[in-house]
Image (tube, helix red, strand yellow):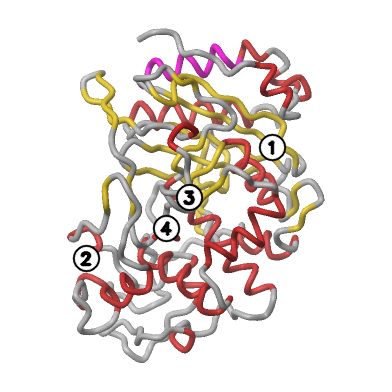
């Protein structure tokens, strides 16, 4: 594999991201070599890293190729599909509504909806916002994985509301009591639910009075200055996007971008600079560069980790949107994302008010997972 081209350091510095301000990364070449070695070992075409401290992005840097065919390099402005990292944005939008008193975390979701919602095995047990945020709502993805709701190469044509009504409402085209809901009552067991986060996005729109994508554009993206963050494939310029790649026997093959109707689950495209600003606020009590997206007590509540029944052994806790797992012996709030040709991760260290983000344009593999974790750990060593 050829050497990975590096982002022009002048471009990084021009964006105000001072590598030398971080003692552990005083020499950019040291990080470059470390990242390059791990990319080569995992056959990762392109990768971007971001590091924030005290609410400010300190480093945003691109490595490798955003597009192999054209030789276009990854930069700090390249837009990656971030997949399930989107859930942390959806959770933040919901918590903003809760702060405003428009949603109560422990109140039933049903009264806000325009279709009936109940686990048919436990029809009297209400499903709450908190349960949706913590993957304990009893909404199951079993049926979700039996039906391919995705579209290849463009955004989904089915609306979020129609998707949810078809999946969750009795009589819906995708409804199956045993596949759309788990056997456990709401609130009793952890079961990762994409459908649950789709419902959160729909709920936010119903309560907020407009599509949640518009809410986030006005209340998250604009205040934080996220100018290269989008919700759809159509509004993401191809010339600024990282082409997703699947690797088989060392050969990297481009795959079409994926669209799906449950967009609150994982449709965001963002640059490393943009998303690291969002992560900076999450690690800094809800504030980045003087912009308050959440109150400190709200951000603390999101990162208050619980251990519900059924939590898998690779997690040490579940918060409101954020999860927790061990990285080199230390428990860190984090979230991962993956889709065909996409593998991403964000980690927080609230004690040092530090956030680390890694984007790649490759399908997850054991080698890619090891590489991403190694890079994140290296970044957090600077805290």
Q: Position of residue 284 (x, y in %)?
A: 73, 49
Q: Position of residue 280 (x, y in %)?
A: 68, 44
In the drawing, does residue 263 fall left or right of residue 171? right
Instruction: Look at discs 1 and 4 and give the one toward the viewer.
Output: 4
Of label 1 and label 2, which has the lower sequence position?
1
Q: Is residue 161 magenta?
A: no
Which SS class for mark 1? Answer: strand
Q: Does residue 226 sit above or below 139 in this rendering?
A: above
Q: Which residue position holds label 3?
A: 268
Question: For mark 2, does the 10 Å Cα neighbourhood hold few (<14), some (14 to 19), or many (20 or more) residues?
Answer: some
Q: Which residue position holds label 2?
A: 143
- Residue stretch in magenta: 31-42
In the drawing, does residue 73 fall left or right of residue 260? right
In the image, 218 versus 203, the foreground residue is 218
In the image, 86 versus 319, the foreground residue is 86
| Spatial CA span between label 1 and label 2 | 39 Å
Of label 4 and label 2, which has the lower sequence position?
2
Q: Which residue position holds label 4?
A: 265
| Spatial CA span between label 3 and label 4 | 9 Å
Q: Kindly identify the residue that appears in the image at 30 percent across and 68 percent down.
A: 140
| Spatial CA span between label 1 and label 3 | 20 Å
Q: Identify the residue at the far right of this view.
A: 290
């Amino acid at each position: 594999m050829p050497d990975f081209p590096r982002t022009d350091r002048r471009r990084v510095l021009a964006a105000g991201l001072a590598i030398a301000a971080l003692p552990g990364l005083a020499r950019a070449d040291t990080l470059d070599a470390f990242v390059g070695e791990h990319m080569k070992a995992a056959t990762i075409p392109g990768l971007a890293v971001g590091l924030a401290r005290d609410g400010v992005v300190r480093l945003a840097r691109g490595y490798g190729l955003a597009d192999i065919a054209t030789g276009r390099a990854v930069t700090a402005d390249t837009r990656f599909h971030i997949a399930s990292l989107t859930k942390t944005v959806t959770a933040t939008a919901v918590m903003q509504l809760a702060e405003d008193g428009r949603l109560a975390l422990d109140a039933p979701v049903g009264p806000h909806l325009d279709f009936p919602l109940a686990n048919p095995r436990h029809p009297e047990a209400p499903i709450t916002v908190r349960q949706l945020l913590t993957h304990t709502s009893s909404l199951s993805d079993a049926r979700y994985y039996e039906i391919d709701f995705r579209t290849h190469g463009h955004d989904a044509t089915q609306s979020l509301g129609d998707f949810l009504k078809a999946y969750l409402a009795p009589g819906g085209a995708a409804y199956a009591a045993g596949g759309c809901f788990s056997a456990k009552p709401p609130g009793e067991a952890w079961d990762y639910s994409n459908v649950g986060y789709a419902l959160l996005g729909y709920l936010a729109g119903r309560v907020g009075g407009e599509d949640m994508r518009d809410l986030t554009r006005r209340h998250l993206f604009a205040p934080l200055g996220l100018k290269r963050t989008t919700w759809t494939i159509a509004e993401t310029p191809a010339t600024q996007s990282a082409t997703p790649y699947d690797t088989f026997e060392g050969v990297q093959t481009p795959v079409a971008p994926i669209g799906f109707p449950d967009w609150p689950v994982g449709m965001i495209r963002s640059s490393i600079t943009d998303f690291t600003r969002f992560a900076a606020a999450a690690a800094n009590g809800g504030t980045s560069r003087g912009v308050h997206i959440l109150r400190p007590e709200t951000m603390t509540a999101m990162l208050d980790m619980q251990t519900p029944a059924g939590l898998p052994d690779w997690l040490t806790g579940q918060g409101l949107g954020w999860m927790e797992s061990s990285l080199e012996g230390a428990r860190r709030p984090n979230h991962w994302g993956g889709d065909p040709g996409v593998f991403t991760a964000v980690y927080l260290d609230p004690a040092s008010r530090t956030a680390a983000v890694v984007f790649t344009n490759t399908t997850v593999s054991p080698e890619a997972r090891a590489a991403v974790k190694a890079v994140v750990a290296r970044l957090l060593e600077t805290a």
